[in-house]
Image (cartoon, grey):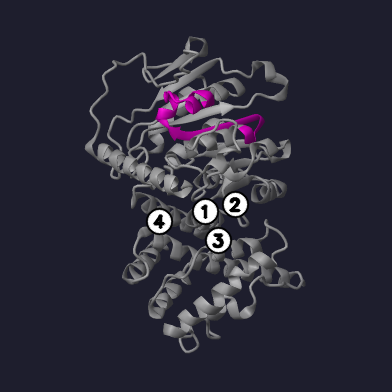
Amino acid sequence: MFEQTFRNIDNVLWKEAGCATELDYTEQTSWMLFLKYLDDLESERAMEAMLVGKPYEHVIVEPFRWSNWAAPKKDNGSFDHDTALTGDDLLEFVNRKLFPYLQGFKERASGTDTVEYKIGEIFGEIRNKFQSGYSLRDALELIDQLSFGSQTEKHELSELYEAKIRNMGNAGRNGGEYYTPRPLIRAMIQVTKPRIGERVYDAAAGSAGFLCEAYEYLRYRADGTGQDLSTSDLDTLQKRTFYGKEKKSLPYVIGIMNMILHGIETPNLVHGNSLTENLADVQEKDRFDVILANPPFGGKERKEVQQNFPVKTGETAFLFLQHFIKYLRAGGRAAIVIKNTFLSNSDNASRALRQELLASCNLHTILDCPGGTFLGAGVKTVVLFFEKPALSQVEGAATRHIWYYQLDPGRSLGKTNPLNDNDLADFVARQAGFEDSDNSWTLDVADIDPDSVDLSVKNPNKADAEPLRDPEVIINEIETLDKESEEILEGIRGML
Protein backbone atom coordinates (compact mmCIF):
# COMPACT_ATOMS: atom_id res chain seq x y z
CA MET A 1 0.00 0.00 0.00
CA PHE A 2 2.80 2.46 0.90
CA GLU A 3 5.64 0.97 -1.16
CA GLN A 4 5.18 3.30 -4.14
CA THR A 5 5.06 6.30 -1.81
CA PHE A 6 8.45 5.31 -0.37
CA ARG A 7 9.84 5.00 -3.90
CA ASN A 8 8.52 8.43 -4.78
CA ILE A 9 10.14 9.90 -1.64
CA ASP A 10 13.48 8.37 -2.66
CA ASN A 11 13.09 9.85 -6.14
CA VAL A 12 12.63 13.31 -4.63
CA LEU A 13 15.68 12.84 -2.39
CA TRP A 14 17.75 11.52 -5.30
CA LYS A 15 17.21 14.81 -7.15
CA GLU A 16 17.96 16.92 -4.05
CA ALA A 17 21.49 18.38 -4.08
CA GLY A 18 21.80 18.19 -0.29
CA CYS A 19 21.25 14.41 -0.19
CA ALA A 20 24.05 12.38 -1.75
CA THR A 21 23.87 8.89 -0.21
CA GLU A 22 21.51 6.21 1.08
CA LEU A 23 22.45 7.40 4.57
CA ASP A 24 21.15 10.87 3.73
CA TYR A 25 17.95 9.42 2.27
CA THR A 26 17.23 7.45 5.43
CA GLU A 27 18.11 10.33 7.76
CA GLN A 28 15.90 12.85 5.98
CA THR A 29 13.03 10.39 5.65
CA SER A 30 13.38 9.65 9.38
CA TRP A 31 12.85 13.16 10.73
CA MET A 32 9.83 13.75 8.51
CA LEU A 33 8.37 10.34 9.38
CA PHE A 34 8.88 11.02 13.07
CA LEU A 35 6.97 14.32 12.98
CA LYS A 36 4.14 12.76 10.95
CA TYR A 37 3.96 9.87 13.42
CA LEU A 38 3.92 12.26 16.36
CA ASP A 39 1.09 14.27 14.81
CA ASP A 40 -0.98 11.14 14.18
CA LEU A 41 -0.33 9.94 17.74
CA GLU A 42 -1.34 13.28 19.26
CA SER A 43 -4.49 13.42 17.13
CA GLU A 44 -5.44 9.93 18.31
CA ARG A 45 -4.83 10.80 21.96
CA ALA A 46 -6.74 14.08 21.68
CA MET A 47 -9.71 12.19 20.23
CA GLU A 48 -9.58 9.58 23.00
CA ALA A 49 -9.50 12.33 25.64
CA MET A 50 -12.44 14.13 24.04
CA LEU A 51 -14.54 10.95 24.02
CA VAL A 52 -14.16 10.61 27.81
CA GLY A 53 -14.58 14.32 28.44
CA LYS A 54 -10.98 15.01 29.46
CA PRO A 55 -8.67 17.79 28.24
CA TYR A 56 -5.58 16.90 26.23
CA GLU A 57 -2.43 18.98 26.25
CA HIS A 58 -0.46 18.65 23.02
CA VAL A 59 3.28 18.08 23.20
CA ILE A 60 3.83 20.19 20.07
CA VAL A 61 2.28 23.68 20.11
CA GLU A 62 0.03 24.56 17.19
CA PRO A 63 2.34 26.55 14.88
CA PHE A 64 4.80 23.64 14.81
CA ARG A 65 2.35 20.74 14.44
CA TRP A 66 2.67 18.74 11.24
CA SER A 67 -0.95 19.42 10.33
CA ASN A 68 -0.29 23.16 10.56
CA TRP A 69 2.92 23.71 8.58
CA ALA A 70 3.69 20.49 6.70
CA ALA A 71 0.23 19.46 5.56
CA PRO A 72 -2.44 22.16 6.08
CA LYS A 73 -5.90 20.99 5.07
CA LYS A 74 -9.08 22.68 3.92
CA ASP A 75 -12.38 22.07 5.70
CA ASN A 76 -13.17 19.25 3.25
CA GLY A 77 -9.90 17.48 4.13
CA SER A 78 -8.07 18.25 0.86
CA PHE A 79 -4.57 19.70 0.87
CA ASP A 80 -4.51 23.49 1.17
CA HIS A 81 -1.90 24.62 -1.34
CA ASP A 82 -2.80 28.27 -0.76
CA THR A 83 -1.55 28.33 2.84
CA ALA A 84 1.22 25.68 2.61
CA LEU A 85 4.72 27.11 2.82
CA THR A 86 7.06 26.29 -0.05
CA GLY A 87 10.34 27.38 -1.59
CA ASP A 88 12.56 29.69 0.47
CA ASP A 89 9.72 30.41 2.90
CA LEU A 90 9.51 26.74 3.81
CA LEU A 91 13.29 26.40 4.25
CA GLU A 92 13.33 29.53 6.42
CA PHE A 93 10.60 28.14 8.66
CA VAL A 94 12.13 24.66 9.00
CA ASN A 95 15.74 25.76 9.55
CA ARG A 96 15.24 28.86 11.68
CA LYS A 97 12.04 28.17 13.57
CA LEU A 98 10.96 24.50 13.56
CA PHE A 99 14.30 22.81 14.28
CA PRO A 100 15.35 25.27 17.04
CA TYR A 101 11.93 24.80 18.69
CA LEU A 102 12.22 21.00 18.58
CA GLN A 103 15.83 21.04 19.79
CA GLY A 104 14.72 22.99 22.86
CA PHE A 105 12.62 20.08 24.12
CA LYS A 106 15.70 18.42 25.60
CA GLU A 107 16.13 21.22 28.14
CA ARG A 108 12.39 21.55 28.79
CA ALA A 109 11.69 17.82 29.31
CA SER A 110 10.86 16.55 32.79
CA GLY A 111 12.98 13.42 32.36
CA THR A 112 15.04 11.38 29.90
CA ASP A 113 12.30 8.75 29.51
CA THR A 114 9.76 11.22 28.10
CA VAL A 115 8.75 11.77 24.49
CA GLU A 116 9.73 15.42 24.93
CA TYR A 117 13.32 14.45 25.72
CA LYS A 118 13.46 12.10 22.71
CA ILE A 119 12.24 14.94 20.45
CA GLY A 120 15.04 17.17 21.74
CA GLU A 121 17.64 14.44 21.34
CA ILE A 122 16.63 13.61 17.77
CA PHE A 123 16.52 17.15 16.49
CA GLY A 124 19.68 18.06 18.34
CA GLU A 125 21.52 15.44 16.25
CA ILE A 126 20.23 15.94 12.72
CA ARG A 127 19.68 18.86 10.40
CA ASN A 128 17.53 19.48 7.38
CA LYS A 129 19.64 18.72 4.31
CA PHE A 130 17.14 19.91 1.73
CA GLN A 131 18.52 22.86 -0.20
CA SER A 132 15.38 23.32 -2.28
CA GLY A 133 12.18 24.28 -0.52
CA TYR A 134 10.25 22.93 -3.51
CA SER A 135 11.81 19.47 -3.16
CA LEU A 136 11.09 19.57 0.57
CA ARG A 137 7.45 20.47 -0.14
CA ASP A 138 7.17 17.47 -2.49
CA ALA A 139 8.67 15.15 0.14
CA LEU A 140 6.38 16.46 2.88
CA GLU A 141 3.26 15.90 0.78
CA LEU A 142 4.38 12.32 0.08
CA ILE A 143 5.11 11.64 3.75
CA ASP A 144 1.64 12.97 4.60
CA GLN A 145 0.14 10.15 2.52
CA LEU A 146 1.51 7.64 5.05
CA SER A 147 -0.69 6.69 7.98
CA PHE A 148 0.05 5.19 11.39
CA GLY A 149 -3.62 4.61 12.18
CA SER A 150 -3.82 0.80 12.24
CA GLN A 151 -1.47 -2.00 13.27
CA THR A 152 -1.46 -3.23 9.66
CA GLU A 153 -0.29 0.18 8.44
CA LYS A 154 2.41 0.38 11.11
CA HIS A 155 3.61 -3.11 10.20
CA GLU A 156 3.91 -2.22 6.52
CA LEU A 157 5.75 0.99 7.36
CA SER A 158 8.15 -0.90 9.61
CA GLU A 159 8.88 -3.38 6.81
CA LEU A 160 9.57 -0.57 4.32
CA TYR A 161 11.75 1.25 6.84
CA GLU A 162 13.74 -1.92 7.53
CA ALA A 163 14.35 -2.19 3.78
CA LYS A 164 15.75 1.36 3.80
CA ILE A 165 18.09 0.46 6.66
CA ARG A 166 19.20 -2.68 4.81
CA ASN A 167 19.92 -0.66 1.66
CA MET A 168 21.79 1.91 3.73
CA GLY A 169 23.98 -0.82 5.22
CA ASN A 170 24.66 -2.40 1.83
CA ALA A 171 25.63 0.95 0.32
CA GLY A 172 28.92 1.24 2.22
CA ARG A 173 31.81 -0.83 3.47
CA ASN A 174 30.55 -0.57 7.04
CA GLY A 175 27.29 -2.41 6.38
CA GLY A 176 27.34 -4.27 9.68
CA GLU A 177 27.36 -0.98 11.58
CA TYR A 178 23.81 -0.25 10.48
CA TYR A 179 22.31 -3.60 9.61
CA THR A 180 22.67 -7.02 11.19
CA PRO A 181 20.87 -9.66 9.07
CA ARG A 182 17.45 -10.19 10.61
CA PRO A 183 17.51 -14.01 10.22
CA LEU A 184 20.69 -14.07 12.36
CA ILE A 185 19.08 -11.79 14.97
CA ARG A 186 15.97 -13.99 15.09
CA ALA A 187 18.08 -17.12 15.60
CA MET A 188 19.97 -15.41 18.46
CA ILE A 189 16.64 -14.51 20.07
CA GLN A 190 15.27 -18.02 19.67
CA VAL A 191 18.29 -19.39 21.54
CA THR A 192 18.27 -16.81 24.36
CA LYS A 193 14.45 -16.99 24.72
CA PRO A 194 13.60 -13.64 26.38
CA ARG A 195 10.47 -13.64 28.53
CA ILE A 196 8.00 -10.91 29.39
CA GLY A 197 9.16 -9.25 32.61
CA GLU A 198 12.85 -9.55 31.69
CA ARG A 199 14.93 -6.58 30.56
CA VAL A 200 16.59 -6.78 27.13
CA TYR A 201 19.69 -4.68 26.40
CA ASP A 202 21.94 -3.65 23.52
CA ALA A 203 24.76 -1.23 24.36
CA ALA A 204 25.69 -0.78 20.69
CA ALA A 205 22.17 -0.50 19.37
CA GLY A 206 22.80 0.91 15.89
CA SER A 207 19.44 0.91 14.10
CA ALA A 208 17.93 -1.08 17.03
CA GLY A 209 17.39 -4.24 15.02
CA PHE A 210 17.94 -6.52 18.03
CA LEU A 211 15.46 -4.60 20.21
CA CYS A 212 12.85 -4.47 17.44
CA GLU A 213 13.08 -8.19 16.70
CA ALA A 214 12.97 -9.00 20.43
CA TYR A 215 9.78 -6.93 20.67
CA GLU A 216 8.28 -8.83 17.72
CA TYR A 217 9.19 -12.13 19.39
CA LEU A 218 7.66 -11.21 22.75
CA ARG A 219 4.63 -9.42 21.34
CA TYR A 220 3.58 -11.84 18.62
CA ARG A 221 5.64 -15.01 18.42
CA ALA A 222 6.48 -16.07 21.97
CA ASP A 223 4.27 -19.17 21.61
CA GLY A 224 5.11 -19.70 17.95
CA THR A 225 1.84 -18.38 16.57
CA GLY A 226 1.18 -15.06 18.27
CA GLN A 227 -0.51 -14.40 21.58
CA ASP A 228 -2.98 -12.29 23.48
CA LEU A 229 -1.27 -10.25 26.18
CA SER A 230 -2.76 -8.58 29.22
CA THR A 231 -2.81 -4.81 29.56
CA SER A 232 -0.11 -5.14 32.21
CA ASP A 233 2.10 -7.21 29.89
CA LEU A 234 1.68 -4.71 27.06
CA ASP A 235 2.59 -1.86 29.40
CA THR A 236 5.69 -3.80 30.50
CA LEU A 237 6.75 -4.32 26.88
CA GLN A 238 6.28 -0.63 26.12
CA LYS A 239 8.09 0.84 29.12
CA ARG A 240 10.24 -1.64 31.04
CA THR A 241 11.65 -4.21 28.62
CA PHE A 242 13.89 -2.80 25.88
CA TYR A 243 16.96 -0.70 26.63
CA GLY A 244 19.79 0.47 24.43
CA LYS A 245 22.59 2.96 23.91
CA GLU A 246 24.07 4.28 20.69
CA LYS A 247 27.10 6.52 20.31
CA LYS A 248 26.65 7.85 16.79
CA SER A 249 24.00 10.38 15.84
CA LEU A 250 22.59 8.92 12.64
CA PRO A 251 22.02 5.34 13.84
CA TYR A 252 20.58 6.75 17.08
CA VAL A 253 17.92 8.69 15.16
CA ILE A 254 17.20 5.72 12.90
CA GLY A 255 17.01 3.39 15.90
CA ILE A 256 14.42 5.61 17.60
CA MET A 257 12.27 5.69 14.45
CA ASN A 258 12.67 1.95 13.90
CA MET A 259 11.49 1.13 17.43
CA ILE A 260 8.52 3.50 17.08
CA LEU A 261 7.47 1.89 13.79
CA HIS A 262 7.65 -1.54 15.39
CA GLY A 263 5.26 -0.40 18.12
CA ILE A 264 7.47 0.85 20.96
CA GLU A 265 6.09 4.36 21.39
CA THR A 266 8.68 5.80 23.80
CA PRO A 267 11.93 3.90 23.24
CA ASN A 268 14.42 3.59 26.11
CA LEU A 269 17.25 4.36 23.71
CA VAL A 270 20.00 6.63 25.05
CA HIS A 271 22.38 8.66 22.91
CA GLY A 272 25.84 8.13 24.37
CA ASN A 273 28.98 6.02 24.48
CA SER A 274 28.47 2.92 26.65
CA LEU A 275 32.22 2.46 26.98
CA THR A 276 32.70 5.65 29.00
CA GLU A 277 30.94 3.99 31.95
CA ASN A 278 33.28 2.65 34.63
CA LEU A 279 32.54 -1.04 35.15
CA ALA A 280 33.52 -0.72 38.81
CA ASP A 281 30.41 1.41 39.36
CA VAL A 282 27.90 -1.11 37.95
CA GLN A 283 25.30 -2.19 40.53
CA GLU A 284 22.75 -4.99 40.49
CA LYS A 285 19.94 -2.61 39.52
CA ASP A 286 21.90 -1.69 36.39
CA ARG A 287 22.05 -5.24 35.04
CA PHE A 288 19.93 -6.94 32.38
CA ASP A 289 18.41 -10.39 31.87
CA VAL A 290 19.07 -10.72 28.13
CA ILE A 291 21.82 -9.00 26.13
CA LEU A 292 21.80 -9.10 22.32
CA ALA A 293 24.36 -7.15 20.32
CA ASN A 294 26.64 -6.79 17.34
CA PRO A 295 29.21 -4.31 18.69
CA PRO A 296 31.48 -2.44 16.26
CA PHE A 297 34.91 -3.95 15.73
CA GLY A 298 38.09 -2.50 14.31
CA GLY A 299 37.69 0.82 16.09
CA LYS A 300 40.04 2.14 18.74
CA GLU A 301 39.15 3.77 22.04
CA ARG A 302 41.31 6.34 23.81
CA LYS A 303 43.37 5.39 26.86
CA GLU A 304 41.08 7.20 29.31
CA VAL A 305 38.19 5.02 28.11
CA GLN A 306 40.29 1.86 28.44
CA GLN A 307 40.82 2.69 32.12
CA ASN A 308 37.18 1.74 32.74
CA PHE A 309 37.93 -1.93 32.02
CA PRO A 310 39.86 -4.69 33.81
CA VAL A 311 41.39 -5.90 30.53
CA LYS A 312 43.03 -2.91 28.85
CA THR A 313 42.71 -2.90 25.06
CA GLY A 314 41.98 -0.38 22.36
CA GLU A 315 39.83 -2.84 20.38
CA THR A 316 36.25 -1.58 20.67
CA ALA A 317 34.61 -5.00 20.39
CA PHE A 318 36.70 -6.41 23.26
CA LEU A 319 35.71 -3.51 25.50
CA PHE A 320 32.07 -4.08 24.64
CA LEU A 321 32.39 -7.77 25.49
CA GLN A 322 33.66 -6.84 28.97
CA HIS A 323 30.77 -4.38 29.26
CA PHE A 324 28.27 -7.10 28.42
CA ILE A 325 29.74 -9.62 30.87
CA LYS A 326 29.55 -7.04 33.66
CA TYR A 327 26.02 -5.90 32.80
CA LEU A 328 24.57 -9.41 32.56
CA ARG A 329 22.46 -10.32 35.56
CA ALA A 330 22.94 -13.63 37.40
CA GLY A 331 20.85 -16.16 35.53
CA GLY A 332 20.90 -13.95 32.41
CA ARG A 333 21.66 -14.95 28.81
CA ALA A 334 23.64 -13.20 26.10
CA ALA A 335 24.28 -13.58 22.37
CA ILE A 336 27.07 -11.40 20.97
CA VAL A 337 28.42 -11.14 17.41
CA ILE A 338 32.20 -10.75 17.30
CA LYS A 339 35.01 -11.14 14.75
CA ASN A 340 36.15 -14.78 14.58
CA THR A 341 39.78 -13.84 15.21
CA PHE A 342 38.79 -13.18 18.82
CA LEU A 343 38.79 -16.95 19.32
CA SER A 344 42.49 -17.33 18.48
CA ASN A 345 44.29 -13.97 18.79
CA SER A 346 47.52 -14.48 20.75
CA ASP A 347 47.85 -10.98 22.26
CA ASN A 348 47.56 -10.67 26.04
CA ALA A 349 44.21 -8.84 25.98
CA SER A 350 42.52 -11.46 23.80
CA ARG A 351 43.79 -14.35 25.91
CA ALA A 352 42.83 -12.63 29.16
CA LEU A 353 39.35 -11.87 27.86
CA ARG A 354 38.79 -15.47 26.73
CA GLN A 355 39.91 -16.67 30.16
CA GLU A 356 37.51 -14.23 31.83
CA LEU A 357 34.60 -15.33 29.64
CA LEU A 358 35.22 -19.03 30.35
CA ALA A 359 35.69 -18.47 34.08
CA SER A 360 32.86 -16.06 34.87
CA CYS A 361 30.25 -17.31 32.40
CA ASN A 362 29.04 -20.49 30.80
CA LEU A 363 30.06 -20.05 27.15
CA HIS A 364 27.85 -22.88 25.94
CA THR A 365 27.57 -22.22 22.18
CA ILE A 366 29.67 -20.73 19.36
CA LEU A 367 27.99 -20.21 16.00
CA ASP A 368 30.50 -19.89 13.15
CA CYS A 369 29.07 -17.67 10.40
CA PRO A 370 30.24 -17.96 6.79
CA GLY A 371 31.80 -15.11 4.82
CA GLY A 372 29.15 -12.92 3.24
CA THR A 373 26.79 -13.13 6.24
CA PHE A 374 27.15 -9.37 6.65
CA LEU A 375 26.54 -7.82 3.27
CA GLY A 376 29.13 -5.22 2.45
CA ALA A 377 31.47 -6.47 5.19
CA GLY A 378 33.84 -9.32 4.33
CA VAL A 379 35.12 -10.04 7.85
CA LYS A 380 34.12 -13.44 9.19
CA THR A 381 32.22 -13.49 12.45
CA VAL A 382 31.04 -15.83 15.18
CA VAL A 383 28.20 -15.51 17.67
CA LEU A 384 29.03 -16.17 21.32
CA PHE A 385 26.15 -17.51 23.41
CA PHE A 386 26.79 -17.44 27.14
CA GLU A 387 24.99 -17.40 30.48
CA LYS A 388 25.82 -15.81 33.81
CA PRO A 389 25.31 -18.49 36.48
CA ALA A 390 22.65 -17.85 39.11
CA LEU A 391 23.96 -16.62 42.46
CA SER A 392 23.25 -20.03 43.96
CA GLN A 393 25.46 -21.68 41.31
CA VAL A 394 28.67 -19.71 41.71
CA GLU A 395 30.70 -22.90 42.17
CA GLY A 396 29.60 -24.04 38.71
CA ALA A 397 30.46 -20.77 37.08
CA ALA A 398 33.24 -21.99 34.81
CA THR A 399 32.42 -23.18 31.30
CA ARG A 400 32.64 -26.98 31.09
CA HIS A 401 31.73 -27.68 27.45
CA ILE A 402 31.34 -25.56 24.32
CA TRP A 403 29.04 -26.65 21.52
CA TYR A 404 30.13 -25.41 18.09
CA TYR A 405 28.01 -25.10 14.98
CA GLN A 406 29.54 -24.32 11.59
CA LEU A 407 26.86 -22.66 9.49
CA ASP A 408 26.96 -23.85 5.87
CA PRO A 409 24.07 -22.62 3.71
CA GLY A 410 25.40 -24.60 0.75
CA ARG A 411 25.89 -21.47 -1.36
CA SER A 412 27.94 -18.29 -1.43
CA LEU A 413 26.17 -15.52 0.47
CA GLY A 414 25.90 -12.09 -1.09
CA LYS A 415 23.48 -9.32 -2.00
CA THR A 416 21.57 -11.58 -4.38
CA ASN A 417 21.76 -14.57 -2.01
CA PRO A 418 21.45 -13.20 1.54
CA LEU A 419 21.13 -15.25 4.69
CA ASN A 420 17.57 -16.45 5.37
CA ASP A 421 15.66 -18.06 8.25
CA ASN A 422 15.82 -21.52 6.67
CA ASP A 423 19.62 -21.35 6.68
CA LEU A 424 19.54 -21.15 10.48
CA ALA A 425 16.71 -23.58 11.19
CA ASP A 426 19.02 -26.58 11.68
CA PHE A 427 21.26 -24.61 14.04
CA VAL A 428 18.31 -23.53 16.22
CA ALA A 429 16.88 -27.05 16.32
CA ARG A 430 20.16 -28.79 17.16
CA GLN A 431 21.26 -26.12 19.63
CA ALA A 432 18.26 -26.84 21.86
CA GLY A 433 19.79 -30.25 22.65
CA PHE A 434 23.46 -29.48 21.85
CA GLU A 435 23.20 -32.19 19.21
CA ASP A 436 26.37 -33.16 17.35
CA SER A 437 26.35 -33.61 13.57
CA ASP A 438 28.60 -33.11 10.54
CA ASN A 439 28.39 -29.36 11.18
CA SER A 440 28.32 -29.39 14.98
CA TRP A 441 30.54 -30.80 17.71
CA THR A 442 31.31 -30.44 21.41
CA LEU A 443 34.60 -29.29 22.93
CA ASP A 444 35.58 -30.19 26.47
CA VAL A 445 37.12 -27.09 28.06
CA ALA A 446 39.58 -29.33 29.89
CA ASP A 447 41.16 -30.03 26.49
CA ILE A 448 41.87 -26.35 25.80
CA ASP A 449 45.50 -25.22 26.04
CA PRO A 450 45.55 -23.15 29.27
CA ASP A 451 48.27 -20.85 27.92
CA SER A 452 46.84 -19.93 24.52
CA VAL A 453 43.16 -20.44 25.48
CA ASP A 454 42.61 -21.05 21.76
CA LEU A 455 38.89 -21.46 21.00
CA SER A 456 39.24 -21.61 17.20
CA VAL A 457 36.55 -23.23 15.12
CA LYS A 458 38.07 -26.56 14.07
CA ASN A 459 35.42 -28.95 12.81
CA PRO A 460 36.69 -32.47 13.57
CA ASN A 461 34.22 -33.88 11.03
CA LYS A 462 35.69 -32.07 8.01
CA ALA A 463 39.02 -32.00 6.22
CA ASP A 464 41.42 -29.22 7.14
CA ALA A 465 41.50 -27.73 3.66
CA GLU A 466 39.58 -24.49 3.43
CA PRO A 467 37.32 -24.11 0.36
CA LEU A 468 38.11 -21.32 -2.08
CA ARG A 469 36.32 -18.14 -1.11
CA ASP A 470 33.97 -16.19 -3.32
CA PRO A 471 35.78 -13.21 -4.99
CA GLU A 472 33.12 -10.79 -3.69
CA VAL A 473 33.86 -11.90 -0.12
CA ILE A 474 37.61 -11.37 -0.64
CA ILE A 475 37.05 -7.87 -2.07
CA ASN A 476 34.73 -6.96 0.81
CA GLU A 477 37.29 -8.20 3.33
CA ILE A 478 40.04 -6.09 1.71
CA GLU A 479 37.78 -3.02 1.86
CA THR A 480 36.94 -3.73 5.51
CA LEU A 481 40.62 -4.11 6.42
CA ASP A 482 41.30 -0.79 4.66
CA LYS A 483 38.58 0.83 6.76
CA GLU A 484 40.00 -0.67 9.97
CA SER A 485 43.43 0.70 9.05
CA GLU A 486 41.91 4.15 8.52
CA GLU A 487 40.19 3.98 11.93
CA ILE A 488 43.39 2.87 13.67
CA LEU A 489 45.32 5.76 12.11
CA GLU A 490 42.52 8.12 13.08
CA GLY A 491 42.69 6.83 16.65
CA ILE A 492 46.46 7.33 16.74
CA ARG A 493 46.09 10.88 15.42
CA GLY A 494 43.48 11.55 18.11
CA MET A 495 45.90 10.46 20.84
CA LEU A 496 48.72 12.69 19.62
Secondary structure at badge 4 equals helix
Comparing 486 with 37, the one in front is 486
Foreground tag (4 vs 1): 1
Residue type beneath disc 2: Leu
Over which residues does the magenta segment extend? 326-353
Residue bearing the label numbered 4: 164
Residue 282 visible somewhere in the drawing: no
Q: Identify the mark nearer the N-term, 3 or 1.
A: 3
Q: Residue furthest bottom?
A: 82
Per the rendering, the mark at residue 255 is 1
Q: Earlier in the sequence, mark 4 or mark 3?
A: 3
Q: Nearer the viewer, residue 340 or 230?
A: 340
Q: Is residue 188 left or right of residue 227?
A: left
Task: Give the CA distance from mark 4 to mark 2.
Answer: 20 Å
Q: Secondary structure at mark 3?
A: loop
Based on the picture, tell me whether residue 327 belongs to the magenta stretch.
Answer: yes
Residue occupied by mark 3: 150
Residue type pointed to by label 1: Gly
Marks 3 and 1 close (CB-CB < 8 Å): no
Residue on which the image places disc 2: 269
- Is residue 307 a member of the stretch shown in magenta? no
Q: Could you tell me which secondary element the residue under label 1 belongs to?
A: helix
